[in-house]
Image: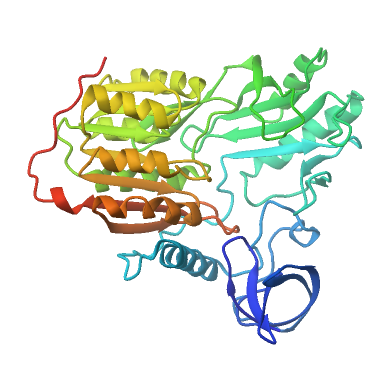
Amino acid sequence: MTVDRLAYGGEAVGRYQGLVVFVSGAAPGETVRVRVRRVQRRHVEADVVSVENPSPERVAPRCMHYAQGCGGCTWQHVDYACQLRAKESAVRDSLARLAGLRDLPLLPIIPAPSPWHYRNKMEFAFNPDGVLGLHPRGAWHSILPLHECFLAPPLTVALVEAAQAFAREANLSLHDPRTHQGMLRELVVRHSRGTGETMLGIVTSPGRFDAAAAMAERLAAVDASVVSVVRSIRASSDTSAPLQQTTLLRGQDHITENVGGLHFGIGVETFFQTNSAQAERLVALVRELAGDLGGALAIDIYCGVGMFTLALASAGAQVVGIELSASSVAAAQVNATSNGLQQTRFLAGDARTVLAEVLAECGPPHVVVLDPPRAGAGGKVMRRIARAAPARIIYVSCNPTTLARDLVELEPFGYRVSVVQPLDLFPQTYHVETVVALDRHAILTTSAPPPACESE
């Protein structure tokens, strides 16, 4: 079969005798022989057996683990310029097909400064055989031992190897995801682009971990940039479950990242944009789209540790940040104080209820910024934002599918898309960040922003 394009989700798409085929490991424009892996109602899924006529956009993968099916990358076999085109198309197609938005003001995607070594956070899992590494694609009970990685900073591999060696030498009990037995589970590596600091999180099951201090010392000795080693407990068998009871083992309990002239304290589980270089551009873009705020009220929903909240405050807005995680709100408050931005207020709770309380107290905002999780904000939140009638809504999305679904909710309220700006925060993968600005036509002629709510 001949491959037509790359699809959002990581696979390539083509047709065979009219049947849609999703193929992993193929590049646009090439002819491949494939083996069917799964038959669905309207399409089939397949794997490449051989490349009969290679695409000019196919490149040799840089990492030795890519051919082994490492789950860290999906598009390392495709030229970076081709990746960017595919991501831009994914945004355009999703908004057209799912939201009915055509003739969009879609700007060219902003590429990453470097498609390599950009991730500031990586998580690696242990298996009962003493291997520390990444999961193969689609095989979450297996682990590939890590010998190189071109997504994380180069120091990361040395830290993984040191942790693996210590676990083997100390004969530590290692977690088995099938039986849910074993103490040592994961290693989290976080790195600050702005300060050069590195944090390590040793994730374990509940219980005594007598080797914790010795393991912390071994890992800290790998490089002087390691300024923080902590232990966190995960009681659940679900690897996505929140960490509990973080204990400082060595150094400080956080590292500091600098973005947009602001500094942010980052703990082991703090949500922060994974690509610090592109986070800088993201903050600048949101500031620019927010316009001249002049002391007006802005609301930042899903604010995390306050990256956009503080950026808007530094631009002169009175800002309320809303975030479900109480620990993130506490970190955001510390960040606001350390940056000298007192005209901010942070509230912990579900956006659906907290937003209503803020609107009842403060009145309509001039700007609303939202950066929801991959699942999107949902209709209730979007409609509540629309009824508040802000002059501008700025939606930051990591999923064009849920972005399209949420934007549909705004159209009946008179909102129209003014700007669509994709950014590549995740080279070598299919993920794409998108910033959309929407204006409410009925109030576009308003010259002065609404009054601000006084911060507490």
Colour mapping:
rainbow
Q: Which quarter of the rendering shows the C terminus?
A: top left
Rendered image quadrant of residue 134 = top right
Residue 334 in the image: above or below residue 257:
above
Looking at the image, can residue 203 be seen? yes
Q: Is residue 427 left or right of residue 38?
A: left
Q: How far across and down, in percent of the image, does residue 138 sit? A: 76, 53
Q: Nearer the viewer, residue 391 or 226?
A: 391
Residue 253 in the image: above or below residue 299:
above
Q: Which quarter of the rendering shows the N terminus?
A: bottom right
Q: Is residue 196 left or right of residue 154?
A: left
Q: How far across and down, in percent of the image, does residue 311 sit? A: 31, 35
Measuring 45% from the left and 24% from the top, which residue is drawn there? 349
Q: How many circles with numbers are drawn on the protein?
A: 0
Rendered image quadrant of residue 15 = bottom right
Q: How far across and down, in percent of the image, does residue 285 sit? A: 32, 48
Measuring 80% from the left and 50% from the top, which residue is drawn there? 139
Looking at the image, can residue 25 be seen? no
Q: Is residue 406 left or right of residue 318?
A: right
Q: Nearer the viewer, residue 277 or 359?
A: 359
Q: Nearer the viewer, residue 18 or 201?
A: 18
Rendered image quadrant of residue 449 = top left
Measuring 71% from the left and 52% from the top, which residue is drawn there? 71
Q: Is residue 287 left or right of residue 380?
A: left
